Image (tube, rainbow, N blue to C red):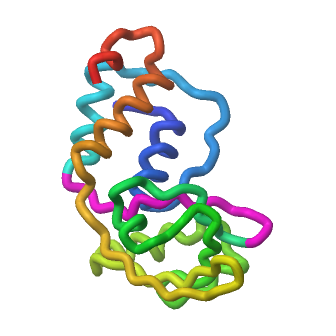
Amino acid sequence: MIRTTRLTALLMALMINGAAVSAGEPKRCSADAKACERAIREMLVGQKYLGVELINSPQGVTVKSVMPDSPAQSARLRAGDIVLVLEGHDLSSLQVREIKKYIEEAKKRGKVMMITRRNGTLTRTDIRFAVMQKKHIDKIVAAHMKESHPTESDYGRL
């Protein structure tokens, strides 16, 4: 089994089951590269995601990044957007890790409602979760291999 907080943070960021929290120094997996790759792919196939990474900032819960070709990009979210409301819950006093339950509840329904602020303008956005595409899984695997298995040649074939 793969036991690395960095892998979990990376997967969470890209799937938005929650949000990435810096895991500090990169950690090597206890699994070999092939087993690691297989485990990641098995974990992600069929998973629903939004494709947005959220962070805590002085302004509140903020969009750090949006994956290309993701539901979040289709919904026109952008880095720097401030998420004020998620599924009817005021996020002004919450940390990113505390909103995971709201995202999980929304995932069961297949969509999430957000109210964001960009340049002083409030926007309501409904985003449908989508099944993660192979190209996104490939990027996650490649990033993990590069960081957690840098001396093993297996990640070069991705």
In the rendered structure, the answer to whether residue 51 lies left or right of residue 35 reads right
Provide residue 146's location: percent of width, then percent of height.
45, 23
In the image, residue 80 lies in the stretch drawn in magenta: no
Magenta stretch in the rendered image: 46-59
Q: Residue at x 35, y 33 (%)?
A: 141
Q: Is residue 79 above or below residue 86?
A: above
Residue depicted at 60% across the width and 76% down the height: 83
- On screen, residue 19 above or below 83: above
- Magenta run includes residue 51: yes
Picture coordinates of residue 139, whole percent (x, y): 36, 37
Percent coordinates x, y for residue 112 in the rendering: 40, 79
- Residue at 47 percent across and 60 percent down: it is 52
Whether residue 51 is situated above or below residue 31 in the rendered picture: below
Q: Quadrant of residue 26?
A: top right
Q: In terms of depth relative to the viewer, which is nearer, 71 or 119?
A: 119
User: 39 left or right of 98?
Assistant: left
Q: Is residue 5 left or right of residue 23?
A: left
Quadrant of res 30: top left
